[in-house]
Amino acid sequence: MTNLRKKFRQWQNNHPNFITPNLEKQSQRNNYIIELSSGRDIDDSKMFGVSVYEHTPENEHSNFTAPNHDLNKPFHDREEAMAYFNTLKKQFKNYNSIKKVVNEVEK
């Protein structure tokens, strides 16, 4: 696991998402972390979230920020969440610009 991925795991453990606090998978592409997390929604149904976080020098030690909330999506189905997680991994591998990733994912 890379140093950035370790930092993200530590950060996420200290700042869990209210609905999806359990980090299941993560992938690093340059200074971005793509994460798949799980939990329960307010109706106690299984819930999954896929989010993209950017790591920058300004927030290196404590914060990861989601640069584009259009990429962050909730799911009730794990297979759909995994498919989206894998799509983002592929798009980040193919493109260096987050704007290009957003354009490709939104097609």
Image: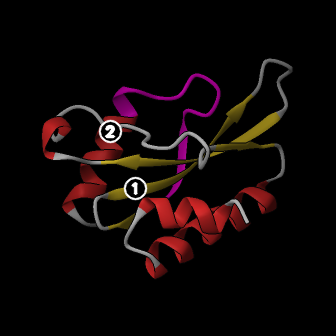
> Does the magenta run of residues contain 36?
no
Do callouts 2 and 1 mark residues in contact (Cβ within 8 Å)? yes
- Label 1 neighbourhood size at 10 Å, few (<14), some (14-19), many (20+)? many
**Residue 97, located in which quarter of the rendered image?**
bottom left
Q: Position of residue 101 (x, y in %)?
A: 53, 65
Q: Is residue 87 left or right of residue 60?
A: right
- Circle 2: residue type: Phe
Q: Residue at x 41, y 46 (%)?
A: 53
Q: Position of residue 27 (x, y in %)?
A: 44, 64
* Mark drawn on residue 64: 2
* Mark drawn on residue 33: 1
Q: Looking at the image, is mark 2 or mark 1 earlier in the sequence? A: 1
Q: Nearer the viewer, residue 107 or 87?
A: 107
Placement of the N terminus among the 4 image quadrants: bottom left
Magenta stretch, residue numbers: 13-27
Image: 63 above or below 90: above
- Label 2 neighbourhood size at 10 Å, few (<14), some (14-19), many (20+)? many
Q: Is residue 102 left or right of residue 64?
A: right
